[in-house]
């Protein structure tokens, strides 16, 4: 992609001002019209949100979107939609032992509500705060209990595929463990063993950094700086690493761009988190310097890979090795083409990745690293593009907010409007949520409000 190094948050002010009314109308209509008995809204088909049974990982994005809309606008209608939805339907997600998605569902709802109360944006209520915090404590512990060990290194939170499977996606569920730890909680194991949620979160981050992210060190012939494998597979009997794999990408040896984007967003968030922890909490796990280096390397590598392997406007295709790209000539030397007849773009990857770029850029800039400005500019450029046609949906009939997103290309779950077989023109729930989240991040940069983090303000923050 081409980075406009002169872009600043101020350049997005008018687009953000136009964006929030569009976002508000979409989420109000969805929350007021959606029947929770149908499950979670996942993706649109001909402009209407539908469910797609696989795992229930998107409900929190629906109600979290409403909460973020309140955050940006102070319109209490959205707070009530998000709060009521959280109370009515999110409890099963807190105790869900079968998924790796707690950071998606529960931090986006209970976590955002807690954050708003701590920021003074909603009235303080000790019982209401206790309700949010209890949910977050349990969610982090339930997620941490989904645990596999490896033969020669740290363990990991295993995916819905089973104990042998480490997904790149799950790095963003580590924040469920992080918040739970911040609240003083632990996982209680057999014989009352007290298991550190911070420790498990850092182990998972270390395993993902080692096995799912590549650094150009010759692990295989496709090893280049920042490439991300969607899945790493281990022998469940002895914990040995066996191979890279994928569920939604083209191949184990190419990069599914949404998996890349989860890595881009997840590691900078954890860098922000460990900054608020005192040295003595980090010492048992290697200390601040070692942990910071472990988190920073995959953050930089994945963001660099995104920049190098994305079209000029910052909107990626769904997989960097998708076979149809070979028919498109120098597709990286021009803006992405969502209406092409070869391979779909995935704007949801752009929305998630933009947040990773912005967070990494901000984190580096605070430390005087000149590269921080480059990552920040890249994130602002991606978001700016998403806030205009053909990606932002202003059609009141279409229920989606961010167009040209895809869910599962290999299984053909995404709607193909024409006989070319290439899906376009539809939205997915995580794409809509992460567009709103990235927009809120930049809105706070403009307004000078507190930094938007998943853990919220903390008294006595550390380094």
Image (cartoon, helix red, strand yellow):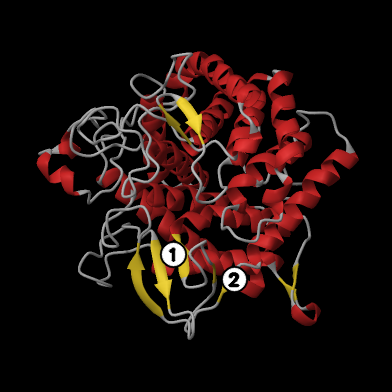
Q: Is residue 335 left or right of residue 204?
A: left
Q: Looking at this view, is 237 or 9 the one in front?
A: 237
For the point 35% across and 33% down, the residue is 415
Q: Is residue 390 left or right of residue 366?
A: left
- When the figure is inspected, residue 183 is found, relative to residue 120, above or below; the finding is below
For the point 33% across and 64% down, the residue is 214
Q: Which residue is mark 2?
A: 147
Residue 21 location, quadrant? top right
Closer mark to the observer between disc 1 and disc 2: 2
As measured in the structure, the alpha-carbon distance from the residue carrying label 1 to the one carrying label 2 is: 17 Å
Q: Looking at this view, is 259 or 27 the one in front?
A: 27
Q: Is residue 271 left or right of residue 318?
A: right
Q: Which residue is mark 1?
A: 209
- Quadrant containing the N terminus in the rendered view: top left
Residue 291 in the image, given as x and y percentages of width and height: 54, 65
Residue 195 in the image, given as x and y percentages of width and height: 71, 73
For the point 45% across and 42% down, the residue is 361
Residue 329 in the image, given as x and y percentages of width and height: 10, 39
The label on residue 403 is none
Q: What element does badge 2 sit on?
A: strand
């Amino acid at each position: 992609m081409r980075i406009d190094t002169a872009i600043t948050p101020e350049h997005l002010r008018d687009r953000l001002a136009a964006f929030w009314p569009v976002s508000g109308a979409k989420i109000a209509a969805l929350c007021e019209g959606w029947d929770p008995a149908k499950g979670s809204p996942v993706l649109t088909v001909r402009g209407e949100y539908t469910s797609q049974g696989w795992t229930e990982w998107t409900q929190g994005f629906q109600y979290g979107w409403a909460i973020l809309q309140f955050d940006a606008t102070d319109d209490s209608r959205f707070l009530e939609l998000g709060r009521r939805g959280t109370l009515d339907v999110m409890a099963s997600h807190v105790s869900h032992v079968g998924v790796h998605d707690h950071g998606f569902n529960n931090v986006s709802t209970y976590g955002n509500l807690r954050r708003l109360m701590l920021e003074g944006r909603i009235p303080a209520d000790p019982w209401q705060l206790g309700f949010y915090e209890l949910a977050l404590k349990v969610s982090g512990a339930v997620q941490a209990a989904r645990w596999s060990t490896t033969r020669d290194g740290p363990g990991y939170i295993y995916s819905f595929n089973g104990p042998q499977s480490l997904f790149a996606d799950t790095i963003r569920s580590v924040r469920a463990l992080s918040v739970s730890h911040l609240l003083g909680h632990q996982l209680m194991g057999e014989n009352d063993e007290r298991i550190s949620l911070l420790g498990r979160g850092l182990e998972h981050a270390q395993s993902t950094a080692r096995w799912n992210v590549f650094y150009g060190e010759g692990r295989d012939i496709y090893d280049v700086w920042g490439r991300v494998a969607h899945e790493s597979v281990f022998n469940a009997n002895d914990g040995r690493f066996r191979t890279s794999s994928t569920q939604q990408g083209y191949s184990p040896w190419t990069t599914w761009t949404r998996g890349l984007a989860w890595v881009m967003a997840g590691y900078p968030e954890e860098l922000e988190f460990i900054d608020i922890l005192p040295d003595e909490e980090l010492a048992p796990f290697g200390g601040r310097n070692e942990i910071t280096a472990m988190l920073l390397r995959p953050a930089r590598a994945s963001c660099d890979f995104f920049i190098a392997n994305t079209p000029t406007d910052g909107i990626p295709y769904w997989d960097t090795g998708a076979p149809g790209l070979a028919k498109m000539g120098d597709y990286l030397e021009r803006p992405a083409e969502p209406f092409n007849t070869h391979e779909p773009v995935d704007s949801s990857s752009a929305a998630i990745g933009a947040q990773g770029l912005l967070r990494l850029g901000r984190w580096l800039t605070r430390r005087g690293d000149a590269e921080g400005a480059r990552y920040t500019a890249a994130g602002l450029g991606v978001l700016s593009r998403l806030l205009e046609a053909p990606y932002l949906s202003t059609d009141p009939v279409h229920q989606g907010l961010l167009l040209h997103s895809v869910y599962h290309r290999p299984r053909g779950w995404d709607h193909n409007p024409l006989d070319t077989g290439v899906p376009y023109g539809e939205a997915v729930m995580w794409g809509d949520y992460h567009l709103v989240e990235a927009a809120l991040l930049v809105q706070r940069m403009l307004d000078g409000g507190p930094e938007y983090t998943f853990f919220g303000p903390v008294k006595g923050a550390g380094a």
